[in-house]
Image: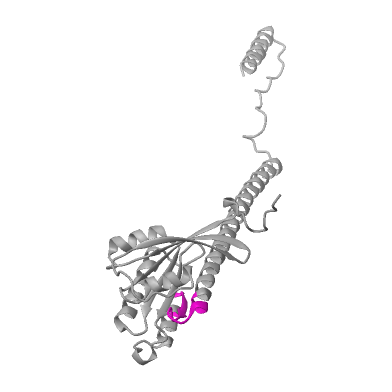
């Protein structure tokens, strides 16, 4: 009987799914970067009108990850951006170091994503990526410019060569996935913390209400009794008279008083 190799079978419930999208101006090398993420191959020429979504499995810090990555093409319209933002949690915003206009468009794309999905524990992971770093003779965008943009927007930054840098593109991919993990953990911890804070507030509110009610009861018990609080004072008996007529009247008054009291 053949033994199953360790790690050969992965249960689906152990997978963490991350959805990513590669954005940028046409011609910056989005497809070349995507293929480098998935394979060791580099292909220089692609159909600039072709969009595709790939599924890739990888192991990051002991966690099996199912990565759905969308390679985009064509004009970055509002409709396209809204679709990408509803699909992904990880964004690779790509520009070419040999094209100044692609850098400006990358800046606009990253800012647009931030407006719709603010950074934070539950927000997106955005990576600013400069490509074609090997074409130094044609460079129009300095590496420092890309770093400053990423720092300004609170994003990650890499400058790579898809043609020559397989290892650095893999480092970019794994680092990006780890950033997603960190955001997910921070988001979970934040929700737990918020729940604890809300529970503590509710407990303090109930405790305060109990203390206020207790204090009110104690004040009522210690307050001096006033005439309005005292038992009703019945009409005082008239002085006894030696007259039979007066005695009869006194008896009538006494009976009336008893009847009146009994009615309560």
Left or right, residue 212 beside residue 66: right
Say how the picture is coloured. Answer: one colour
Q: Which of 20 and 238 is in front in this view?
A: 20
Res 250 → quadrant: top right
- Front residue of 41 and 31: 41
Task: Give percent across and percent down for residue 107.
Answer: 35, 76
**Lateral position of residue 55 relative to residue 244, left or right:** left
Q: Which residue lies furthest to the bottom in this view?
A: 137
Q: Is residue 99 above or below residue 10?
A: below
The one nearer the camera, 92 or 264, is: 92
Percent across and percent down for residue 150 are 44, 78
Q: Position of residue 172 (x, y in %)?
A: 50, 74
| Magenta range | 151-169
* In magenta segment, residue 139: no
The residue positioned 62% from the left and 67% from the top of the image is 61
- Residue drawn at 67 percent across, 29 percent down: 231
Depth check: 51 or 75 in front? 51
On whether residue 163 falls in the magenta region, the answer is: yes
* Residue 214 sits in quarter: top right
**Residue at point 31% right, 74% down?**
25
């Amino acid at each position: 009987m053949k033994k199953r190799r360790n790690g050969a079978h992965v249960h689906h419930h152990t997978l963490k799914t991350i959805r990513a999208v590669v954005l940028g101006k046409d011609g910056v090398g989005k497809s070349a970067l995507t293929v480098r993420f998935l394979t060791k191959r580099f292909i220089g020429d692609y159909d600039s009108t072709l969009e595709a979504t790939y599924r890739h499995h990888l192991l990051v810090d002991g966690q099996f990850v199912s990565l759905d990555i969308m390679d985009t093409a064509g004009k970055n319209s509002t409709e396209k951006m809204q679709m990408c933002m509803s699909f992904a949690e990880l964004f690779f915003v790509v520009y070419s170091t040999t094209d100044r206009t692609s850098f400006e468009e990358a800046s606009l794309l990253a800012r647009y994503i931030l407006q719709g999905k603010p950074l934070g524990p539950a927000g997106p992971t955005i990576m600013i990526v400069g490509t074609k770093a090997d074409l130094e003779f044609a460079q129009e965008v300095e590496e420092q410019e890309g770093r400053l943009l990423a720092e300004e927007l609170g994003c990650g930054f890499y400058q790579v060569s898809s043609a020559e840098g397989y290892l650095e593109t893999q480092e970019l991919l794994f680092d990006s996935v780890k950033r997603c993990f960190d955001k997910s953990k921070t988001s979970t911890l934040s929700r737990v913390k918020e729940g604890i804070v809300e529970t503590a507030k509710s407990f303090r509110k109930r405790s305060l209400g109990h203390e206020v009610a207790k204090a009110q009861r104690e004040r009522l018990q210690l307050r001096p009794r006033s005439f309005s609080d005292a038992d009703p004072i019945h009409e005082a008996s008239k002085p006894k008279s030696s007259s039979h007529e007066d005695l009869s009247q006194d008896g009538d008054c006494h009976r009336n008083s008893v009847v009146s009291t009994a009615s309560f």
